[in-house]
Amino acid sequence: MKDLKSVTLITDGACIGNPGPGGWACLLRHGRDSRELCGSAANTTNNRMELTAVLEGLSRLKEPCEVTIVTDSEYVHKGITEWMDRWKRNGWQTADKKKPVKNQDLWKALDDALAPHQVSWQWVRGHAAHADNIRVDKLANGAARRQTDASDEH
């Protein structure tokens, strides 16, 4: 098996109002190379933006990689490392099998996007001196704020 490229993906999502204008951002690092990405959605939730940030970063990988995903979202981290297997066994229902899993479309897309890669997850406390997390937080919040700034001009 050929050696996989080692990539670090740092992600964050933001939302003003929750639901409200949202932003996502990610930073991809491979060796000395890095790439920042960000975007927004008009009426969304913070959790959807957190998931979107991971999906957008993974979508930029052109081949299977060894990926370390760094997130400050307990929702994303626990969803992947603790809850997803049970959700899938339960037909994408919550643990008590009474309700569909929220954001199921994004969780299913994430499950598919992770498949070709060897992935490890790292949770970091938000806004706690992790330079890359602080950077993607700034980008995600900026993407969300730009929507409100634009709507204030009309």
Image (cartoon, rainbow, N blue to C red):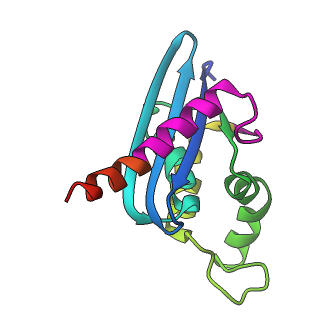
- Residue shown at the point (57%, 52%) measured from the top left: 50
Q: Quadrant of the C terminus?
A: bottom left
Q: Is residue 24 left or right of residue 152?
A: right
- Residue shown at the point (76%, 56%) measured from the top left: 78
Q: Is residue 151 left or right of residue 131?
A: left
Horizontal and vertical percent position of residue 1? 63, 23
Q: Magenta part of the protein: which range?
A: 120-143
Horizontal and vertical percent position of residue 24? 48, 47
Residue found at the very far bottom of the displayed protein: 98
Position of residue 2 relative to residue 9, above or below, is: above
> Quarter of the image holding residue 125?
top right
Horizontal and vertical percent position of residue 77? 72, 51
State yes or no: residue 123 in magenta. Answer: yes
Position of residue 38 relative to residue 49, above or below, is: above
Identify which residue, 49 or 77, lies in the foreground.
49
Identify which residue, 106 or 46, lies in the foreground.
46
> Quarter of the image holding residue 41?
bottom left
